[in-house]
Image (cartoon, helix red, strand yellow):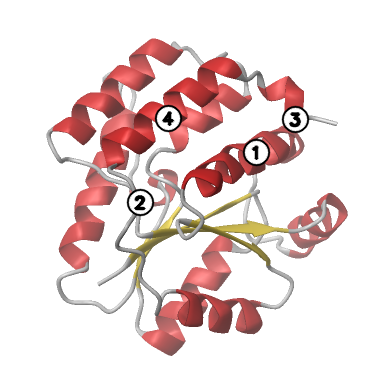
Amino acid sequence: MPIICFEGASAVGKTSLSERLRENYGAFVIPEVNLLFQRKECEPKFWYFEKQIERWKMAVEAAKNHEIVILDGDAFQPLWYNWSFDFDFGEPFEEILGFYQEKLSIGEIDFPDKYFILTLRNDELRNRKISDALRIRKNFERHLRFIQPQIAYFNFIKSINGDLVEFIENKEIEKSAERIINSIKDNNPNRITSLELFDAIENWLNKHNPEEFIS
């Protein structure tokens, strides 16, 4: 059964949309790392990366018994997120690439069957943040910086395989949910291999600076 992934800026509605699909369509939802796991002090360097692998394994297992499995946040997020901020979080590009290449080659992670990239204007995101007083969104304004590089990254993946990525302006959750359900009914059996896709992503990230996409 399909494993799909929701991505987009903070407050764009990934979690709310996931919950709507869980309630109305029986989807199995796997939250983002920071909601699913509690990080203790002195964890190993690649703790966050390893937890992404755990999330993927959870998705594969859940797909055996559920019609739809949703990853709330991309398991490959450390790759494009760190690129968006010029790798100033401590993990060099080569180390992140090496980690994911190894996990891909031994089958411990893979790309989802489809990415849904949720979008909204920045002023709408800020309004949603204000209205959602129950959730703390750390570094919200700084995170708005990665929106354009993130869209460029997923546009590149879409250019390689148009059926792997779909952009949705998430103004109304019910309409977005219906669109997603209709979209995943169509499978794409002809996509390139995961290692080929990863190699293409590596080349693209090496050739582009995130500042190119920030206006």
Please indicate whether residue 97 sits to the left or right of residue 23 in the image.
Answer: left
N-terminal label among 1 and 3? 1
- Residue 213 is labelled as 3
Residue that numbered label 1 is attached to: 152
Query: Which structural element holds mark 2?
Result: helix
| In the image, residue 137 above or below residue 78 | below
Residue that numbered label 4 is attached to: 200
Q: Quadrant of the C terminus?
A: top right
Specify whether residue 143 is in view.
Answer: no
Q: CA distance from mark 3 to mark 2?
A: 31 Å
* Residue in front for this viewpoint, 158 or 52: 158
| In the image, residue 157 above or below residue 206 | below
| In the image, residue 15 above or below residue 90 | below
Look at discs 3 and 2 and give the one toward the viewer.
3
| Amino acid tagged 1 | Ala
N-terminal label among 4 and 1? 1
